[in-house]
Image: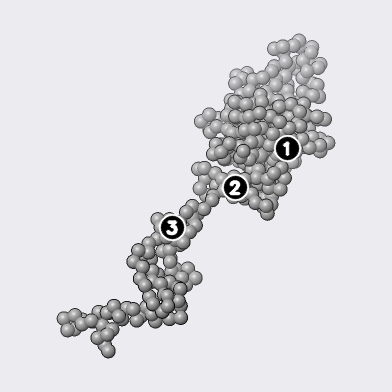
Amino acid sequence: MLDYFVIRVNNDTLVPSPSFVKYILLSLFENQNGESFINSDCTRRSNCSNNQVTLEENYQCSDDATCDERNGIRRCYCNDGYEGDGVECTREMIPKDCKDLLTDDTRDGVYTVYPDNWPNGIQVYCEMESNGGGWTVFQRRSSAAVPFYRGWSEYENGFGNPSEDHWLGNKYIHDITNQKTYELRIDLRNSGSTPYYALYSSFSISDNSDKYRLSIGSYSGDAGKDAMSFSNNKQFSTKDQDYDGWSSYDCAEGHRGAWWFAKQYRCRDHNSSSYCRTYYCPHSNYCEAFPIASDDCVHCADAHLNAEYDGSTRGTNIFWEDISGDDCGLRFTEMKIRPV
């Protein structure tokens, strides 16, 4: 009986015979028809069928899998970010923006997305329940709680809470908007809480080397004037980095915020001192012009949504030129993007 299970070598060394190996495997798989056993280094898989054991010599983990024992089962498991049976693994769909997360059951809230260059992900607020859903929010203003008069580094890296008032960060906005083609939606409410919106067919910004230059498409909506068109192709400016093109004036400082400013209009270049002093500069419809003298003021943009929430000086309010009702005292703004 012993010779059935072992083979003698040089009359003193015993090694398992094939019959013995088969016997052991049958014992392991007794009453386990259809199950598999994988060895310690995941190089061999044994299957049990009709109380017969077959050895599969070519079992091998994918390059994107790890040999491991989990919940008492040893096999190849696909690594994080991949899915499959361990022998073949394919990369899971990684959400690059809120649209990639959109389903019929998805609710508004903060989610993690993985845009290009950010393998560990970033947190963003996703608007999923209105306007078709799938919007990635990068700016919101609803109160004076979060100051927006900040420097270049803070605007580059972002500030505030994604679920509340915030600026996502120019470096993130650049990487998101340069991975696909995105449309921009801007929701506004004036001092009377009347809602308006502006929709732009495309939106992206360049990287830091080009000072986050704005590129924007055609306008539609009910906000009145296409107030972003003047800012198209302009570089971003903050109080400590001025790229508005005017050597004499600092638009970000004068408007108390950060935006895609540029040289646009100085009252005394076109009008008399009396006209500027008595009409143009102090007029309630011209909150977008900040004073530089008693009889002169400067206009740097047709919209500025990162100004002071309750600006006390002419030109420091949040504004959108020619919006119906009140273009100076906007009480809510939200900027968001979605792939087209």
- Toward the bottom, the furthest residue is 1
Label 2, secondary structure: give it.
Answer: helix
Name the image quarter holding residue 170.
top right
For disc 2, the marked residue is 100
Please, which colouring scheme is shown? one colour
Q: Amino acid at mark 1?
A: Asp
For disc 3, the marked residue is 88
Q: Nearer the viewer, mark 2 or mark 1?
A: 2
Q: Horizontal and vertical percent for residue 37?
A: 41, 72
For disc 1, the marked residue is 187
Mark 2 and mark 1: span between their CA atoms? 22 Å
Q: Horizontal and vertical percent for residue 328?
A: 77, 29
As drawn, 103 above or below 249:
below
Contact, mark 1 vs mark 3 (Cβ under 8 Å):
no
Mark 1 and mark 3: span between their CA atoms? 46 Å
Residue at image position (66%, 26%) is 229
